[in-house]
Image (spheres, coloured by chain):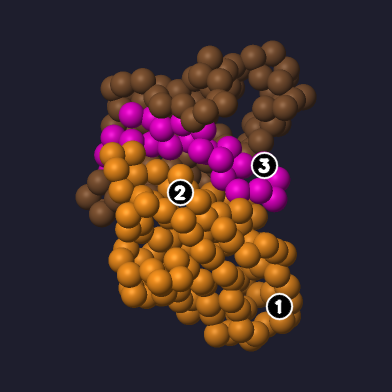
Amino acid sequence: GDSVTQMEGPVTLSEEAFLTINCTYTATGYPSLFWYVQYPGEGLQLLLKATKADDKGSNKGFEATYRKETTSFHLEKGSVQVSDSAVYFCALMSGGSARQLTFGSGTQLTVLP
Amino acid sequence: GAVVSQHPSRVICKSGTSVKIECRSLDFQATTMFWYRQFPKQSLMLMATSNEGSKATYEQGVEKDKFLINHASLTLSTLTVTSAHPEDSSFYICSAREEAANYGYTFGSGTRLTVV
């Protein structure tokens, strides 16, 4: 079945540092890939997405490129801010009628001033 | 953009009682809604898929008689935790899919359930 393997956290960085959170996936066919962010006590918000190979999703300075050859969708940001502290989830959606999301385990990011 | 309202955000109940959680799509119709459970510092576990006008589809290991789901309209799905026990304490999150938004998913803000 489908699965998402995500870099374990927690990750602690200083403000303005470079961020990478690794994400690889296993799926049949050609899934859509997503990054969601969860702030404390809240639900999930879509951060970015990519629907086909070589697509790059970007939002708020975050980027991730759909790499079919390495089945990866790593999240990057060139300069993190304290306000980026949150839990980040990589997810995929396969085809089929259900179109459910499969989530990775989540990575806690803490950015220190 | 699409908004999903989840209510209540926080609830404390006594063991043996039932609790209802509502999930509403405010500005779109959602034929399908999803209910997740999240344990502390863990990922989201899909509990069930709620389909408007039909029975919910439960994931393996989720007790359908324990977690009752009703999706009576295109904008409302409810999850009722029946005869709650302390082990049911968790963070519950709903999600709705807006068909017109290219299968985009919108999540509610979650419900923190504490059973004492």
Viewport quadrant of the C terminus of chain A: bottom right
The part of the chain drawn in magenta is: B28-51
- Residue assigned mark 2: A2
Query: Could you tell me residue B84's position as x and y percent?
Result: 66, 19
Query: Could you tell me residue A2's position as x and y percent?
Result: 45, 49
- Residue assigned mark 3: B39
Question: For chain A, what colour was chosen?
Answer: orange
Structural crowding at the residue carrying mark 1, measured as other residues with C-alpha within 10 Å and reported as few (<14), some (14–19) or many (≥20): some
- Residue assigned mark 1: A13
Question: What residue is shown at x 46% (from left), y 56% (from top)?
Answer: A26
Q: What amino acid is at disc 1? A: Leu
Q: Which mark is residue B1?
A: none
Side of A89 relative to B97 (left or right): right
- Extreme residue toward the left, this view: B100
* Secondary structure mainly formed by the magenta segment: strand
Q: As displayed, is residue A80 above or below residue B58?
A: below
Is there any visible trace of residue B9 in the rendered image? no
Q: What amino acid is at disc 2? A: Asp
- The reply to whether label 2 and label 1 mark residues of one chain is yes
Q: Spatial distance from mark 3 to mark 2, Cα to Cα?
A: 21 Å
Tell me which chain the residue with mark 2 is part of: A
From the rendered image, report the letter of the chain displayed in brown: B
Among the two numbered marks 2 and 1 on one chain, the one whose residue lies closer to the N terminus:
2
- Magenta segment includes A57: no
